[in-house]
Amino acid sequence: MMVPNKESTSKRSKILQLAGKMGLIRPRDLGSIGVDPAYVRHMATKGDLIRLGRGLYALPKLDFTENHTLAEVATWIPNGVFCLLTAARFHQLGTENPGPIWLALDRGKRRPVSTMLPKMHLIHLSPRAMRIGVDVHIVEGVTIRVTSPARTVVDLFRFRRRAGLETALVALRQALRNQIPISEIRQYAVEFRAMTYMRPYLEALL
């Protein structure tokens, strides 16, 4: 029986700590702790980590949630913002299953090429639009960025031709039932120049 040496024990400890901190890790993340990326695959064969897919690992005790896919995508694209139908589902603003992930990227940014990423609908926004009304959440130890409930409602109206007007109306009704302040919805409607179109629907529901 081979006894682990101090070097391998140290590597293992560092990787376990990193996995515990990040939730999901990729081999390239090991460079930040001075460990050869190949070592993560060695730990997976020993059962210290589980391989979720090509290039993605986690602790065996990780509790998967209904938002696990969002955590995976955010691991690969940390600067993306989940929006539209994906954000609506996250905030429970309607019961429709959005299917593909809806993700916003800075203008000029391309989707990373990876076979591990799920099917996605991408929209490109200005740097300002990537910041305003964007909340930060922790899912399975991974930081994800999601448009706020009020911003999500407004975005659904702005992109109604892609997301569907009925989806926007359902989200607005549910947001009001969830007591999302109407003042916040109006604020983002003005900010993103959507008030002219949204006003009749807001007035009809109030």
Image (cartoon, rainbow, N blue to C red):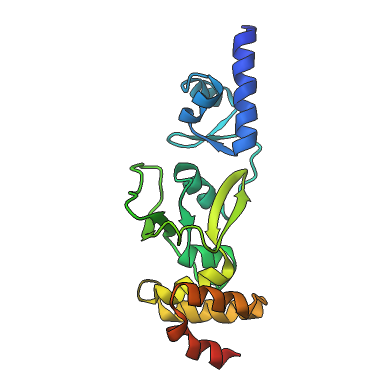
**Quarter of the figure that contains the C terminus:** bottom right
* x and y percentages locating residue 10 in the rendered image: 63, 15
Residue 104, placed above or below residue 56: below
Of the pair 33 and 127, the residue shown nearer to us:
127
Q: Residue at x 65, y 77 (%)?
A: 181
Residue 110, placed above or below residue 90: above
* x and y percentages locating residue 87 in the rendered image: 52, 63
Q: Is residue 178 visible?
A: yes
* x and y percentages locating residue 190 in the rendered image: 49, 77
Residue 138, placed above or below residue 54: below
Q: Is residue 65 visible?
A: no
**Quarter of the figure that contains the N terminus:** top right
Q: Residue at x 47, y 84 (%)?
A: 198
Give the quarter of the image for residue 184.
bottom right
* x and y percentages locating residue 57 in the rendered image: 53, 34
Q: Residue at x 34, y 49 (%)?
A: 109
Is residue 4 shown left or right of residue 41? Answer: right
Q: Residue at x 61, y 78 (%)?
A: 183
Give the quarter of the image for residue 177.
bottom right
Of the pair 182 and 141, the residue shown nearer to us:
182
Of all residues, the one furthest to the bottom in this rendering is 204
Q: Across the whole image, how many numbered discs are drawn on residues?
A: 0
